[in-house]
Amino acid sequence: MRIPRYKRMVDALAAELRSGRWPVGTRLPTHRELAAREGIALVTASRVYAELEAMGLVSGEQGRGTFVRDLALLAEGVDQQFVAADAIDLRFNHPSIPGQADLLRQALRELATAGDLDALLRYQPPRGRVKDRDAVARHLRRRGLTVHAEQVLIVSGAQHGLAATAMATLQHGDVVAVDALTYPGFRVLAQSLGLELVAVPGGRAGPDLVALERLCAQRPVRAVYAMPTLHNPLGWVMSATARARLVAIARRHDLIVIEDAAYAYLVEDPPPPLAALAPERTVYVSSLSKSVGTGLRVGFVLAPDDRVATIARVIRATTWSTPALATEIACRWLVDGTVDRLEARKRADASARQAIAREVFNGLRVTGHPASYFLWLPLAESARADRIAATLARQHIAVSTAEAFAATAQVPQALRLALGSIGLPDLRRTLSEVRRVVEEDAYR
């Protein structure tokens, strides 16, 4: 399908605006100036600017002109014109099931009447207390990992675990191989630390390992960041064969493997983690944010013996230690089986939500794991994700485009829909509205 010239102009200008070529508030060429420069009709130039305004990239002011908007505010949801405070949120997952608040109340009551509460008011060891690390180690052994407490470090959520790992193992300018579509939190982290992310293309089942091998032969790749068990945003689960191949590449080229397992709990009986296949070079990062509660902020890192001390120093430099109260509750739940029970219930909940999404989007191309809390929705060539997101935002529905996930200059036209933050009746109704807007945009 041939894309009209004006749409190609919209894409080119949108890319320049996102790249920061023009500072916020810059006045763009007038409609007449744009028409003359590009050799297009005035009405076409006006249509280009209208498209950019619909995407939320520029604002037109009567009698003054067209100006570059502050994209940082848009990305953070601060701009209430496009993302209202009461929007139905399909951008972030904070899955919760009935009874979780009661579990917290019960845990706080038990904590108030047992143990040494004064100890929870003191500084904790940067790596975490031995009994807490032992509870995490037992939890990880149930995930197929051979681990002892001395390899475990307690962190303030998986994002902190990734940050501590990157700060401890990588240096400014290091090259890190990532999937072409990857977790936005790692992209932001890499930018902050001055790491160079190089995209590895992928498909529906995992990264292109031939391309990864070629990249390692051509560039001094220091590490690979991977989500082998329930990739975010595509939902793939790498096969055992693919994992073995990835580990072999890492060993041939002496790569550090950073394994993100934030959503791994949703997959029943997955192949062994990369950390089980290459424990000498893999740092495994996960948390209880998705499986228990996003506000708990308790995560854990499993590191090779020779990396533990360095990561512990970074934890001490960044947070000193994880808050003792949250860690105590989390580890009690690990020991008494509460976490296992919550994970089982959330697997069932995620499966029910995926089933609803598949029904609503029947006939459209979607990508996702059947037990995942998110769905990837590629769009027609004529559709524009930013425009769809802006249209939905005006209807108080917030969605993510591929922009935050893309590690490539060419950003695909797609939406990533988080399914875990609203009730089931609202979910079906909201996804139906998303489909309506998507289909209308494809015919613009």
Image (cartoon, rainbow, N blue to C red):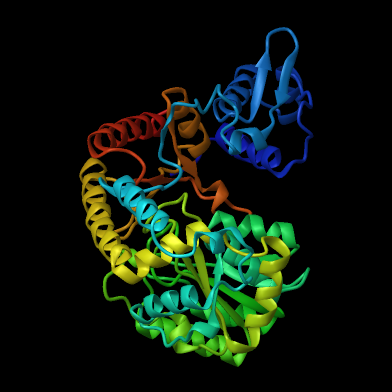
The residue sitting at the top extreme is 63
Q: Nearer the viewer, residue 199 or 330?
A: 330
Residue 241 in percent (x, y) is at: 37, 85
Q: Is residue 23 visible from the viewing direction of this image?
A: yes
- Is residue 245 positioned above or below 321 on the image? below
Residue 340 occupies quadrant: bottom left
Residue 11 in percent (x, y) is at: 60, 39
Q: Nearer the viewer, residue 392 or 425?
A: 425
In this image, 135 relative to 200: left or right?
left
Residue 139 occupies quadrant: bottom left
In this image, 285 relative to 216: left or right?
left
- Is residue 175 positioned above or below 383 on the image? below
Q: Residue at x 77, y 23 (%)?
A: 29
- Which image quadrant: the N terminus? top left
Q: Residue at x 66, y 59 (%)?
A: 189
Residue 42 in percent (x, y) is at: 65, 17
Q: Nearer the viewer, residue 325 or 81?
A: 325
- Is residue 273 positioned above or below 83 on the image? below
Residue 37 in percent (x, y) is at: 76, 28
Q: Residue at x 59, y 66 (%)?
A: 162
- Which image quadrant: the C terminus? top left
Q: Residue at x 50, y 29 (%)?
A: 390
